[in-house]
């Protein structure tokens, strides 16, 4: 059954399948967090959304975390989820000073941002947030890409071109990528999951400059862009 | 950038200022309904969202609601990634967007600091 069988608004199978994979990925072991920890990250992000009214709790109650997260992680999660205007360099530096590693931080950014994407979508089509699956057992990979370096972002990223090495080639497919498609590269699996959602929700990457291509029924490219632009303006996102 | 260029391709006279002043005519068909839905779906007022969704479905289509929800979700994700990681805009986009950034007041966004740490307007 489709993940959105309860919605009055039709969701095409491709998008529902991507979302099902995304939820499964969120509760699976990552590079630095276990499945239970990543599920707790998602649950905390939702709790922050419920508290400020950006999300409505499901009728059967909010998802309960399986593990307790450190205070610094909870602060980072809640700010990214529900207080986007408070993201700045001091916030990042404080998270590092309080004990998160740069790679753990990037993994949290990826999980929370993808969950917000999925939950905004659900809210848009008038259904409650989809339940978080049970966490998957297993250990984090603890793999850090050796070619990630400090460029202009706060965290290391894998550069475009030969400097990115084999992992850069695998992630970017030999194409120069804009920062938004490299930002999470310190945790390659988070970048892959972000791009999967990008392609499902926004457009196929090879069609980005094809302004006549229409990715969603009933929404031309200028209509898609005005929604995108308004959301980013409200979030005060300069990028 | 993509709004302006895609509008040109579709023969539309786009007013980018509508992104920050939604009472203005954006030049996009269905613009007022899309702007209202975009704001409501990421805001705390559930009644406003329900009204915006119904209007969008009536004036454009039910499929438009699904597509606009996907776009709003995607850019909620991207804005968080960009501003939590501290990425600047692409160097190649900096000078070409100078007039637009000033016109829309984008340079006043807090996250503009992530770009102005690296680049300066002439």
Image: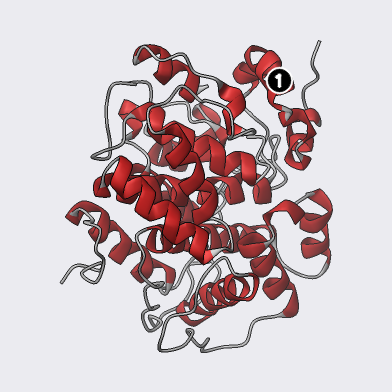
Which of A38/A200 is in front? A200
Task: Please tell me how crowded label 1 is: few (under 14), some (14-19), or many (20+) other residues with Cα within 10 Å.
Answer: few
Say if B2 sits above or below B63 in the image.
Answer: above
The quarter of the image holding the N terminus of chain A is bottom left
Which of B16/B119 is in front? B16
The quarter of the image holding the C terminus of chain A is top right
**Residue A41, x across and y down, in percent:** 56, 74
State the residue at coordinates (34%, 16%).
B10
Say if B9 sits above or below A232 in the image.
Answer: above
Say if B109 sits above or below A44 in the image.
Answer: above
Identify the secondary structure beneath mark 1: helix
* Residue under numbered circle 1: B103
Q: Is residue B120 left or right of residue A33?
A: right
Q: Is residue A147 left or right of residue A25?
A: right
State the residue at coordinates (50%, 64%).
B47
Marked residue chain, label 1: B
**Residue A26, x across and y down, in percent:** 43, 69
Q: Is residue B39 left or right of residue B113?
A: left
**Residue A161, x across and y down, in percent:** 50, 27
Q: Is residue A156 visible?
A: no
State the residue at coordinates (52%, 25%).
B25
Judging from the image, the colouring scheme is secondary structure
Say if A92 sits above or below A160 in the image.
Answer: below
Q: Is residue B114 visible?
A: yes
The quadrant holding residue A79 is bottom right
């Amino acid at each position: 059954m489709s993940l959105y069988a309860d919605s009055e608004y039709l969701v095409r199978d491709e998008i529902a399948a991507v979302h099902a994979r995304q939820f499964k990925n969120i509760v699976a072991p990552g590079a630095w967090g276990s499945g239970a920890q990543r599920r707790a990250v998602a649950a905390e992000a939702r709790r922050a959304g419920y508290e400020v009214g950006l999300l409505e709790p499901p009728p059967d109650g909010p998802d309960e975390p399986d593990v307790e997260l450190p205070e610094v992680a909870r602060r980072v999660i809640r700010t990214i989820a529900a207080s986007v205007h408070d993201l700045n360099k001091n916030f990042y530096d404080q998270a590092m000073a309080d004990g998160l590693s740069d790679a753990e931080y990037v993994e949290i950014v990826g999980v929370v941002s993808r969950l917000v994407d999925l939950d905004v979508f659900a809210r848009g089509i008038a259904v409650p947030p989809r339940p978080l699956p049970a966490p998957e057992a297993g250990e984090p990979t603890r793999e850090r890409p050796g070619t990630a370096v400090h460029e202009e972002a706060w965290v290391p990223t894998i550069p475009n071109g030969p400097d990115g090495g084999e992992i850069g080639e695998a992630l970017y497919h030999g194409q120069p990528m804009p920062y938004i498609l490299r930002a999470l590269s310190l945790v390659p699996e988070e970048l892959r999951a972000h791009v999967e959602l990008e392609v499902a929700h926004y457009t196929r990457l090879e069609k980005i400059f094809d302004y006549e291509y229409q990715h969603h029924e009933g929404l031309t490219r200028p209509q898609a862009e005005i929604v995108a632009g308004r959301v980013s303006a409200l979030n005060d996102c300069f990028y | 950038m993509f709004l302006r260029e895609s509008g040109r391709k579709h023969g539309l006279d786009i007013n980018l200022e509508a992104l920050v002043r939604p009472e203005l005519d954006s030049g996009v068909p269905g613009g007022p309904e899309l702007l209202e839905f975009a704001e409501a779906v990421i805001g705390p007022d559930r009644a406003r969202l329900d009204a915006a969704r119904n209007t969008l479905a009536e004036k454009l289509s039910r499929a438009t609601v699904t597509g606009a929800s996907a776009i709003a979700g995607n850019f909620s994700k991207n804005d968080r990634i960009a501003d939590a990681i501290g990425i600047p805009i692409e160097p190649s986009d900096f000078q070409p967007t100078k007039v637009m950034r000033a016109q829309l007041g984008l340079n006043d966004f807090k996250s503009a600091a992530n770009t102005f740490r690296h680049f300066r307007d002439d």
